[in-house]
Image (tube, rainbow, N blue to C red):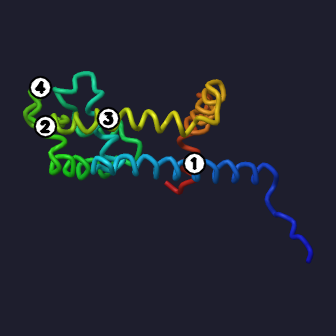
């Protein structure tokens, strides 16, 4: 049986391989985070929202919905529904913004802060374990390379390139 020659250039093969590895790693790591978060009956997205709320400069004051959206690791279009679910679970609450009575702030409730406090050490241990095969220097290099892949090197408009590739 004859082997078929790839129509992809070596550069395209390398780019596709990196893409696949990033997706596999992201899926695997997200599944692990989701499993740990389920121990406290929250989703990974809810944990990340609690992370944003609990680590804010003034967590008891609360944050506008837009600030929560900015801190989320996923698309921000569902932030209001995410906060609705946190509120229904008793993990967050909406309060009037004392600086602008037309808007509300969101803050973690004592129950939300407790869930965050129980999950945070488990997830820190998980993050250490997931990168245990890399040295600190390798992890720093990986982090720098991923930042550059995501955001560019400051000399071009990387966001425009990625948006154009996504058909946006």
Q: CA distance from mark 1 to mark 3?
A: 22 Å
Which mark, residue 51?
3
Q: CA distance from mark 4 to mark 2?
A: 9 Å
Q: Earlier in the sequence, mark 1 or mark 4?
A: 1
Please state the horizontal and vertical placement of residue 123, each as a whole percent of the image.
41, 37
Which quadrant of the figure has residue 140?
top right
- Which type of secondary structure does the marked residue at label 3 adopt? helix
Q: Residues within 10 Å of mark 2 (few under 14, many from 20)?
A: few
Please state the horizontal and vertical placement of residue 116, each as a whole percent of the image.
28, 36
The residue that disc 1 covers is: 25
Q: Earlier in the sequence, mark 4 or mark 3?
A: 3
Q: Residues within 10 Å of mark 1 (few under 14, many from 20)?
A: few
Q: CA distance from mark 1 to mark 2?
A: 39 Å
Quarter of the image that includes the N terminus: bottom right
The residue that disc 4 covers is: 99
The residue that disc 2 covers is: 103
Identify the residue shown where x is 18% and y is 41%: 92
Which quadrant of the figure has residue 160?
top right
Circle 1 or circle 4, nearest the eye: 1
- Which type of secondary structure does the marked residue at label 1 adopt? helix
């Amino acid at each position: 049986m004859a082997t078929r020659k790839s129509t992809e250039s070596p550069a395209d093969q390398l780019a596709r391989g990196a893409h696949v590895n990033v997706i596999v790693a992201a899926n695997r790591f997200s599944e692990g985070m989701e499993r740990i978060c389920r121990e406290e009956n929250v989703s990974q997205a809810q944990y990340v929202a609690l992370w944003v709320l609990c680590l804010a400069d003034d967590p008891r004051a609360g944050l506008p919905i837009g600030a929560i959206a900015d801190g989320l690791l996923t698309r921000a279009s569902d932030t209001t529904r995410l906060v609705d679910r946190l509120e229904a679970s008793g993990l967050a609450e909406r309060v009037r913004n004392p600086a602008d009575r037309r808007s509300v702030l969101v803050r973690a409730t004592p129950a939300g802060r407790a869930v965050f406090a129980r999950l945070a050490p488990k997830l820190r241990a998980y993050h250490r374990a997931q990168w245990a095969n890399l040295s600190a220097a390798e992890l720093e290099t990986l982090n720098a390379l991923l930042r550059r892949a995501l955001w560019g090197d400051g000399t071009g408009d990387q966001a425009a390139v990625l948006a154009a590739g996504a058909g946006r």
